[in-house]
Image (cartoon, grey):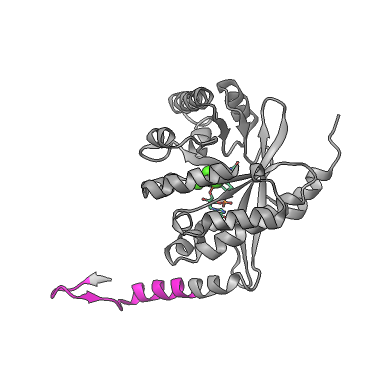
Amino acid sequence: AKLDGRGTFRFFEPAMDARMQARRRLELDMRQALARREFQLHYQPQLNLADERLVGCEALIRWHHPERGLVSPIDFIPLAEEIGLIVPIGEWVIRQACRDAASWPQPLSVAVNVSPAQFKSDRLVETIMSALSQAGLPPSRLEIEITEGVLLQDNEKTLQTLHRMRSLGVRVSMDDFGTGYSSLSYLRAFPFDKIKIDRSFVTDICAEKDPGTKADGEAIIRAIAGLGRSLGMTTVAEGVETPEQLRRIRAEGCTDVQGYLISKPLAADDLLSLLSAPVPG
Ligand code: C2E
Ligand code: CA
Ligand code: CA
Ligand code: CA
C-alpha cells in the first residue's frame, strides 16, 4: 500500500494488485497442498569426519505443485510462516521425518528445521512427543534445527521450550551460525548440541576467491570449530562442494560435514537405497 497526498492508503495500484493476486494464488494453493499430498521430504546426509560414517540426515521440504512444478522452500516457507500455515506444514514435516527415520536400516539421526512461527506455537513439544511415539523413534535420533530468528523472540518461553525438548532427549542445533547479529550470546543462553556453520563461510574457501577472503573464511571456521570443541558441541560445515573445501574444513577441526560433495538432498527412496547398499571395502 502507498500513502497518497491526503495520508490515506491506496491499495489498488495495478502492479501491487498483480503481486497481491499472485501471492493470494500461492496462498490458496499452499492451503490445499497438504491435503493433496504435494509435499515431500528430501534428506541430505551428514558425514562424521573422524570415522567417515554417515551420522544423520537433514530433512528438507519440497513442494511438487501440479502446474508450477517443483517449488523451492525459499519461495513458500516465508509466506507459510507469515500466514501461520507453517504450523500444520511443520507438523507434517516432523511426523513424516520421524516415520521415515524409523524405517532406515541404520540408526542415523534426522534433523528437522523449525521456523520461528512454528516454534512459538503451543503445540510444538506435544507434536514432537506424539510424532516420536507414533513412529517408535527414540528421541535421541531427532534433532531440531533453529536459526537466530527463533531466539530473537527472546523470552523465557523460548528457553523453556528448548529445555523441554532437551529433557525429552531431543537434540537442538543452531543453524546458519555466524550470519546473525548475536550468535555468540545465544550459545551462552542455551547449550546447543550442534553448531551448523553457515555455507557462506565455506563458500569463501575456494581458489577463485581472493587470498584474503579465503584466509578469513578459514579463520572463521577454525574459530567456530574451536568454540564448539570447548563448549562440547558438534560443529557441522554446511554447503561443502569441493575436495579442497573438505580438506581445509577437516584441517580446521570441524567434526562433521554436509554438502553436495557428500550428497545432494535425496528422495526418501534414494536415501534408503544408499543406506542399504553394502559398504565398500
Ligand atoms: P537450510 O536449513 O540452511 O538448509 C540448507 C540448504 O542448503 C538446503 O536448501 C540444501 O539443499 C542446500 N545445500 C546443501 N548442500 C549444499 C551445497 O553443497 N551447495 C549449495 N549451494 N546448497 C546446498 P533447500 O532445501 O532449498 O532449503 C532452503 C531453506 O529452506 C533451508 O535452509 C531452510 O531454511 C528452509 N527449509 C527447508 N525445509 C524446511 C522445512 O521442512 N521447514 C522449515 N521451517 N524450513 C525449511
Ligand atoms: Ca537447516
Ligand atoms: Ca543452514
Ligand atoms: Ca539457511
- Whether residue 113 is visible to the viewer of this picture, yes or no, is yes
Using the image as rendered, state which of residue 278 and residue 146 is in the foreground: 146
Quadrant in the picture for residue 188: top left
In the displayed structure, does residue 272 sit left or right of residue 255?
Answer: right
Residue shown at the point (56%, 63%) measured from the top left: 89
User: Residue 82: x and y, percent?
Assistant: 42, 63
Using the image as rendered, state which of residue 179 and residue 203 is in the foreground: 179
Using the image as rendered, state which of residue 14 and residue 219 is in the foreground: 219
User: Residue 35: x and y, percent?
Assistant: 62, 73
Q: Is residue 97 above or below residue 221?
A: below
Quadrant occupied by the C terminus:
top right
User: Residue 6: x and y, percent?
Assistant: 13, 75
In the displayed structure, does residue 82 sit left or right of residue 114?
Answer: left
Using the image as rendered, state which of residue 10 and residue 183 is in the foreground: 183
Q: Which residue is outermost to the left?
A: 6
Residue shown at the point (63%, 50%) measured from the top left: 59
Residue range of the region highlighted in magenta in the rendering: 3-25
Quadrant occupied by the N terminus:
bottom left
For the image shown, how many numbered marks are present on the structure?
Answer: 0
Magenta stretch contains residue 141: no
User: Residue 172: x and y, percent?
Assistant: 54, 41
Residue shown at the point (81%, 48%) measured from the top left: 273
Q: Is residue 273 above or below residue 35?
A: above
In the displayed structure, does residue 71 sit left or right of residue 57?
Answer: left
Residue shown at the point (36%, 37%) measured from the top left: 182
- Whether residue 45 is visible to the viewer of this picture, yes or no, is no
